[in-house]
Image (cartoon, grey):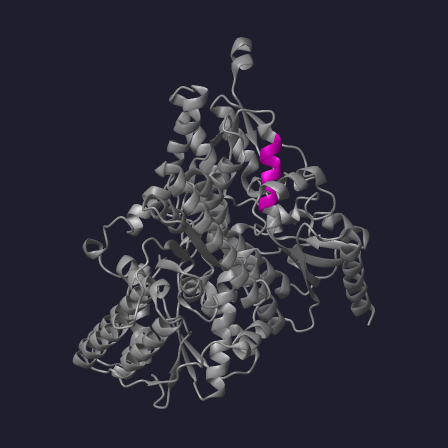
Amino acid sequence: MVAMSSTAVAVGVPRALLYYEFGPAWEEFLTILGAVPVTSGATTRAKIERGICAALDEACLPVKVAYGHCLDLADEVEHLFVPRVVSVEPKAYSCPKLLGLPNMIRLAVPHRVKVLSPLIDLSTGSGGSLLEAARQVAAITGAPSASWRRAARCLTHGTCLARRTVPGQGGAGVGRDGTKVPRSKVPAGGTGAAGDGRARVGLIGHSYNLMDDGLNLSLRDKLGRLGLSLVTPEDYAPGETAAAAGRLLSKPLFWTLGRRLAGAAALMSDDPGIEGLVALASFGCGPDSMVLELVERLTRRLRPDLPFMLLTLDEHTGEAGLLTRLEAFADLVVRRRSG
Amino acid sequence: MMTRNAVVTFPRMGTAVPVFRTILEDLGVQVLVPPEVGPATVSLGVRHSPECACYPLKINLGNYLEAAKRGANTVLMIGGIGPCRLGYYAEVQREVLRDLGVDMRMVVLEPPVRGWRQLAQAIGDVTGGRPWKAIWRAVRLGWLKLNYLDNLEALGHHMRPREARRGSVSKAIAQAQRWMDEAKTFSAIHEAGHAGLELLASVPCHEIADPVRVGVIGEIFMVLEPAVNMGCQEALGHLGAEVEQGVWLSGWVRENIFPGPWRPRGPDSHANLARLAAPYVDYSVGGEGQLNVGHTIELARRGFDGVVHLAPFTCMPEIVARTALDVVSRDFGIPVLTFFLDEHAGEAGMQTRLEAFVDLLRRRGHGERAGTGS
């Protein structure tokens, strides 16, 4: 066993984008197939700078951050794991940039680095493509075919939204958790303020923006310091948000993450205990530009008095400007309470 | 279902305008074509659209608002199933119109991937329940017109660098389009089409041995609508470049609406373009993203001197395409000039860049020819 582990293939896993949804499942998948997953560290300014230089100017910040993680990993390992996550539920997909991510990364890293990008497509409900994903990785690691099915099952389990009934599993355990309130600790029924008397504010956005403190300039921490307790889309079960999105929107959204945050926004604005809504978008994000616009318009009709703030992040966002806006928002929420 | 006094409008997109008008008017629908896209359209659309939405959404909205002012009360728009944003345009636009208090109904033609009922209902709705036979006739009428209009423009792109007097080709095309606009029957369309092509062919031209050849590809709206791409194809022609436009509405219909066996199979068919693109982008990323990569390779193989790539700012599929085009350009030795356009793009800036690009291609071509000749 010792001899085997010394020759085991190290596979880099960028801590970016959908890692914040499915990372643990990916790592387990690779481990079952005999690879050693090497996950990149937290997002740093240096990684962001590296990503900015390598990616197209027009790409969104999270994609640039992913470039940074991949290029850093490419210095150390010969293989990168960048699956092409097409769909994790019926009739909904990732955004086009995520569909093209493996291609963009392959063109950016040195030729010696092999990018493993198995197709993850559960749009038709069958996990058939995942066995193929296992076969692709096994071709590198030489894992016996007996383990493929188990690996594929683990990948299905970790990525299929319908099966993820425990809120936050996969996603929530990933980030450095400072202020996030797991659903179990939210007061039952969602009425009234958080247990500690702090104002409860909904924070919606894609998990890779919300949970990456390096990318979002420690947004959750900043909001926490301003005396706000946060509820995020990850605090609701996927089934719950999907149903709420269905009620809010007249046509089903075809982006999985958009569907989740539209549903979360609907649930939050239905909850009288939520006293404000902060939406975090990336500049140039296609789904955000549509979904958050609709969320703002539709929640305003449901709760005209709910304070709503849209934060748009890119690599030029300054910490001071962000803080000023957050302070103003927190002041507004607190003042409405006493008023 | 449809109120008797429905006045239908639709977004402007190049040759789609006369075609939609022909189809709807043949079915007895009262049509109000939005005015041509101008500064007022852009400013209205931009003011009321989401800031980071892509440019076509903003222009569409400007079209609706201008049409509403002139009396339109129904919008005919297409839907989609993603992952490109276009599929959700109508939903956002409907809510914007509602919040503005503009009383317009949106009829959305959704692709029939989940059954035909919804599409049939929408068509019945907008046509006032006309029989399918009448609808089929109207669609064939529109299709015939579209083919003539696209052929006319394609021929124009070929002739512009050769015209003896600058602007005479565009003038002839405009005249032919006016004739086509008035044609309302099959025979009238054939007549107008032939007359238009003859008129264009009679424009005095010089012989040029070896013009610079440029492919114009990109996102379909940006390629087809001259008001948003600032007449890119015409400008290239006036700079002496022979233009081959890679995206056409008639081509889109052949690839996406024709039943399988009738779809194109040539070297620039979508199937072949996707195959060519595979080493760079091996998955359809929505819109025209993957096809544009394939198209650039196909143009390079046919000896084109350069490619101009048009896309809306923040367009997701085209961002993937552009990333790959950097490498394709290097691998195949074909210069690619990309314009990501939105309301901030200026005509003079584009003109300057196109001039520099054509100069570069011309100089490069001569150098290469001299090199290979010796």
Q: Quadrant of residue B218?
A: bottom left
Query: What residue is at 31 percent from the left and 51 percent from the top?
Result: B270
Query: Residue B281, relative to residue B195: is it above or below?
Result: above
Query: What residue is at 49 percent from the left and 37 percent from the top?
Result: A107
Residue extending farthest to the top is: A3
* Observer-nearest of A161 and B128: B128
Q: Is residue A307 left or right of residue A168?
A: right
Residue B63 among magenta residues: no
Main SS, magenta region, reads: helix
Query: Residue B50, relative to residue B21: is it above or below?
Result: above
Q: Is residue B265 left or right of residue A104?
A: left
Query: What residue is at 38 percent from the left and 82 percent from the top?
Result: B8
Residue B258 at x, y percent in the picture = 24, 60
Query: Residue A335, relative to residue A175: is it above or below?
Result: below
Question: Considering the image in quadrants, where does the N terminus of chain B appear?
Answer: bottom left
Residue B227 at x, y percent in the picture = 46, 71
Q: Which residues are magenta?
A: A63-72
Q: Is residue B105 left or right of residue A221?
A: left
Residue A18 at x, y percent in the picture = 55, 43
Q: Is residue B125 visible?
A: no
Residue B196 at x, y percent in the picture = 25, 75
